[in-house]
Image (spheres, helix red, strand yellow):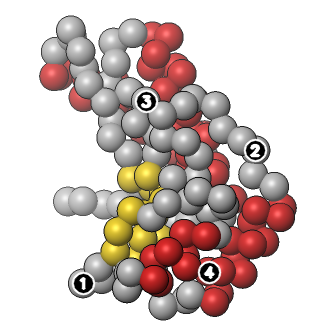
Amino acid sequence: MRIGAHMSAAGGLYKAYQRADDVGCESMLVFTKSNRQWKAKPITEKDVAKYRQEADKFNHIFPVAVHASYLINIASPDDALWEKSHLALRDEVERAAAFDIPYLTFHPGSYMQSSEEAGLARIAEGLRRLVAETAVTAPNTT
């Protein structure tokens, strides 16, 4: 077992490594953008280069996972919110890939005024579409 924590990416994602090392983390969870906004600042080559340099320096901190925005709700019965959430989740996957971070943690959301069954169906639909549109692989959990 490896022990880690959710680390701040304030000032640049690469800074999370030093923060994690400072508190003795063996792994870490990070946001690549504000977790409370739909929009995200584009990732630059410089951002990626700095991150990779720190990843090499602090190679004892692994695995690293991205935590997706709290706004995402692919369980939603509202088509507009569902589509916005799907696009945001796809962006989170692409942002994680840009930094070569292989893991993404997300909360699928709430089925709101619909049923649990309907919410689970929407989540499944969103994940199927995400896998079709990205390089995501879903682990076999059987």
Question: What separation in Å lies between label 4 and label 1 (alpha carbons)?
Answer: 20 Å
From this viewpoint, which residue is outermost toward the right?
Answer: 45
The amino acid type, in three-letter code, at marker 1 is Met
The answer to whether 93 appears left or right of 21 in the picture is right
Q: Secondary structure at mark 3?
A: loop
Kindly identify which residue carries mark 1: 1
Quadrant placement of the C terminus: bottom left
Cβ–Cβ below 8 Å for labels 3 and 4? no
Amino acid residing under circle 3? Leu
* First-in-chain label (2 vs 3): 2
Q: Which residue is mark 2?
A: 42
Mark with earlier residue (4, 1): 1
Q: Secondary structure at mark 4?
A: helix
Between 55 and 12, the residue placed more toward the observer is: 12
The label nearer to you, 1 versus 3, is 3
Q: Position of residue 92 (x, y in %)?
A: 56, 45
Q: Are marks 1 and 3 in contact (CB under 8 Å)?
A: no
Q: Which residue is mark 4?
A: 55
- The answer to which of marks 1 and 3 sits earlier in the sequence is 1
Question: Is 116 located above or below residue 96 in the figure?
Answer: above
Q: Nearer the viewer, residue 142 or 32?
A: 32
Q: Residue at left 45%, top 76%?
A: 20
The picture places residue 53, in percent across and down from the top left corner, at: 72, 81
Residue type, mark 4 in image: Ala
